Image (spheres, helix red, strand yellow):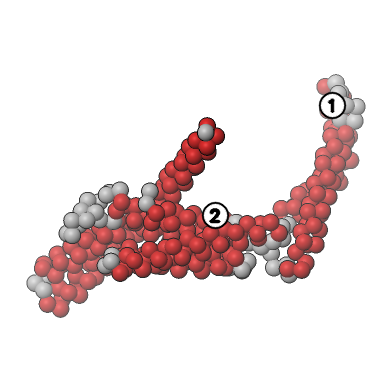
Amino acid sequence: MSQHAESHALASTTDLLASVTPAASATPAHDTSQHEASWWQSGLHNLQRSFENVHAVKHSLHPHGSALAGETALGSTAGASQAAPALQESEQMVDALRRAHPPGGSVGALGRLLGSFGVIGGGAELVHGYHELKAGDTLQGTLDTVAGLGGLGAGGLAMLNAPLAGAVALPAAGLGMMAYGNHMSREWNLFGEGADHRPRSSFDMVGDYMQQAYTGADKTLGGGVAGKVVGGAMAGMTGLATGTVAGAANVVMGVLGAGLGAGRFLKQAALAALSRRGS
């Protein structure tokens, strides 16, 4: 995998991880540690009380431990009314745990760390986008530039622990994966060569389909204003349909490419570690 592809994987993968990291609460910074300790203490207390209630229910239903079959039915009937309060309290405890949200704490720190990676990866994508635009690769350069800006924005929000970080990170990761997948579709030569005798990306193919739709409609109507209007409408509909499919396929290819890149990196790291260990 090229250095270009690796930077795509770094940016989009870290943005994706940051997007699924729970956002920190709005607790002020100076109260975070105290709020976190209080939350965990309350949670542990609720769990302990729930376990105690489970034992109380078990004892109410089977007061003599290992009972005979007839005694079990009698004990269950007689103990049901005694078990009801304990069961109700357990339900309340579990519901309280379900509604509780942990404070920023270590989760917020993880989000900020991933955000810093997203900023680095986004910056690398911006650099690649600049060089691609300079070299005349307008489509891929634009995709990388937009994805890089998204990575910088999402990563910066995560580093600032902003409430919108989680909501922004997933679209940014999607943009990164889409740009990366478009690059990989060209690198894997999935759609043949274009008029310039270079491998086409999936979005290059969409552009070719749009051009064909426009030209076909324009020729059918004999050119003129009607041909151009209908041709433009046909090109737009073709671009919308094929572009949606190509965008989704790019995201899939981006995830696949990032996974392959991560696997290759881990393999190389393991081989390097074994080599050092052997020497």
SS at circle 1: helix
Mark linked to residue 210? none
Contact (Cβ within 8 Å) of mark 1 with mark 2: no
- The structure residue drawn at horizontal position 84% and vertical position 34%, both measured from the top left corner, is 58
Q: Nearer the viewer, residue 247 or 107?
A: 107
- The structure residue drawn at horizontal position 38% and vertical position 48%, both measured from the top left corner, is 1
Q: Is residue 125 visible?
A: yes
Residue 158 x/y as whole percent:
58, 64
Q: Is residue 168 visible?
A: no
- The residue under label 1 is 72
| Direction top: furthest residue | 68
Q: Nearer the viewer, residue 155 or 172?
A: 155
* In front: label 1 or label 2: 2
Q: CA distance from mark 1 to mark 2?
A: 52 Å
- The residue under label 2 is 17
Give the residue type that dot 2 points to: Leu
| Direction front: furthest residue | 279
| Direction right: furthest residue | 64
184 vs 29, left or right, is left
- The structure residue drawn at horizontal position 63% and vertical position 57%, both measured from the top left corner, is 110
SS at circle 2: helix
Residue 182 x/y as whole percent:
34, 56
| Relative height, residue 153 to residue 9 (above, below) | below
9 vs 39, left or right, is left
Residue 276 x/y as whole percent:
52, 37
Residue 148 x/y as whole percent:
44, 65
Give the residue type that dot 1 points to: Thr
